[in-house]
Amino acid sequence: MQAPFTVREAVHAFLRDTGMTTVFGNPGSTEMKFFRHWPREFRYVLALQESVVVAMADGYAQATGRPAFVNLHSAAGVGHAAGSIFTAWRNQVPLVITAGQQTRALFGAEPYLFATEAASFPRPYVKSSEEPASAADVPAAIARAWQLARQRPCGPVFVSIPEDDWDREADPVPPRHVTAGVAPDPAALAELAAALAAARAPVLVLGAAVDQDGGWDAAVALAEQLEAPVWSSPMSGRASFPEDHRLFAGHLPPVRAKLAARLAGHDLVLVIGAPVFTYHVHTEGAVLPPGASLWLLTDDEHAAARALAGRALRCSARAGIEALRASLPVLQRPPGRGRVPAPAPLVEERPNGAVLMAALRRTLPPGALVVEEAPTHRGVLREHFPITRSGGFFAAASGGLGWALPAAVGVALGSPGAPVLCLCGDGSSLYSIQALWSAAQLRLPIVFVIFDNGGYGALKSFGAMLGIPSAPGNDIGGVDFVRLAQSFGCEAVRVDRSVELEPVLRAAWMRREGPKLVQVVLDEGVEKLY
């Protein structure tokens, strides 16, 4: 096309050029002009609430490895979406988030639907936020947002767009390419390689950035080269190492004293693609066991700056691992050892979390992707449901609830044809149950398993740990998830006996077209968190 372009035409062309032709949203009056002359090849994915919109885009961006485009409705929509924006920030997911704004001519009158200080609203949980000074600046602002979102560490970027800007004139966005990787400093890398070669008992701690950066195979090769056990970093939103590998040691707890105890006996701790460290419960004590040194490889300058110990080397995870492997001398070390597999759980008449996890693992189809938000049962997930493939596991790194159901929709959209298993607590699911409607409308091959323990089981466990066993507000009763799912167009079934689990789960995977929900009524015993 020749100038003059409209802002809308310039943005549509940019979205087409960058492959962001899937748009996640819930439209309002201040966004409608964006949809005029909507390109036929574009796909609009409707969610019924804005937090669901952002979480769906989060899952889609993680599954595809590319930025996803989000369209929200003014201040109210951004407010609804704030929790999921925070989760996308903690997940380090590349999102271009746009929101409608009132007509520029009305700004001074504080009109209906006006977003006061729109660019300030989503901060600090975006990499950048702006409302362009003029309509002509909008296409370039969206192009900047795309570039920033995909630079490591990735994250959401926000642009507020007045509703009358879409029909104004603007220049098209010139094509540009900016590389996203960061190479390690050669001198620092040589020091780390020498320290690893001299170490008596090194250990690796891997975070989500390893899998996000495609470093799974490189991490396996490094661990085997060092014969070093591998721990998953606390509260990681991805799996970055095969959990059935002989060197996999387990998942570090987000508690300082317990974490340091797990690393006892090691003289060098190498953390890759994770903070040092993410804690949930405060305890006194040293960050590391006595005599241990620490190195951190990270693409996140903030994680490097706030690390509680050791030396940091800034680089992309895969580039750092591959360069480190090439720098290491030939090592002669005895075979390392990981964890001892957990024994099979004892099966009672009514299922518990461990029995359910074991059944889910046995019935999981090949190539299935797992999306998880069952915080009460994360411990038994790790014991009985090992993740064994790169890009096969997604969880929220924020601690907020309501992410998994919509994220599973996004993961399924971003992985056409792949079966998706969504594991979600009953309390978590009720934050975003509307996502079932989108899954049904799109006929996605998702099996949603609701862990129904009658309330916020993780809080009950946390209360027991703190000596507050009877805190109020932790019980949820009487929710019929089967009828709820059916009202959204989802097939659904309820299970409350252990013997029924495997037949029901196998049947759920038999027909791949469309989502299914399985409500599993669990023993309400309190699970140990850490």
Image: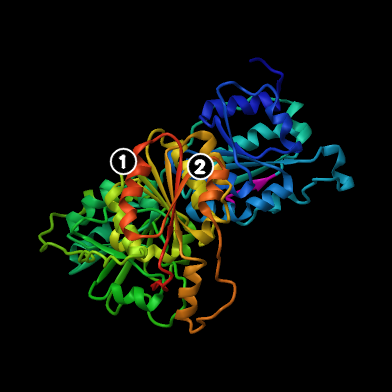
The answer to whether residue 322 is seen in the rendering is: no
Q: Amino acid at mark 1?
A: Gly
Q: Main secondary structure of the magenta part?
A: loop
- Which is more toward the observer, 44 or 187? 44
Label 1: few (<14), some or many (≥20) within 10 Å?
A: few
Q: Which image quadrant is residue 288 in? A: bottom left
Q: Quadrant of the C terminus?
A: bottom left
**C-beta proximity under 8 Å, tags 2 and 1:** no
Q: Amino acid at mark 2?
A: Cys
380 magenta-colored: no
Separation of disc 2 and disc 1 at Cα?
Answer: 23 Å
Instruction: Write down the residue under mark 2.
Output: 490
- For marks 2 and 1, the one nearer the N-term is 1
The location of residue 415, given as percent across then percent down, is 41, 36
The location of residue 101, given as percent across then percent down, is 75, 41
Label 2: few (<14), some or many (≥20) within 10 Å?
A: many
- Which is more toward the observer, 494 or 512? 494
Up-down relation of residue 502 to residue 443 (above or below): below
Q: Position of 106 compared to 470: left or right?
A: right
In the image as oriented, which residue stretches furthest toward the bottom? 467
- Which is more toward the observer, 212 or 292? 212
SS at badge 1: loop
Q: Which image quadrant is residue 248 in? A: bottom left
| Numbered label attached to residue 367 | 1
Q: Quadrant of the N terminus?
A: top right
The location of residue 168, given as percent across then percent down, is 76, 27
127 magenta-colored: yes
> In the rendered structure, which segment of residues is drawn in magenta?
126-130
| Numbered label attached to residue 13 | none
Up-down relation of residue 182 to residue 471 (above or below): above
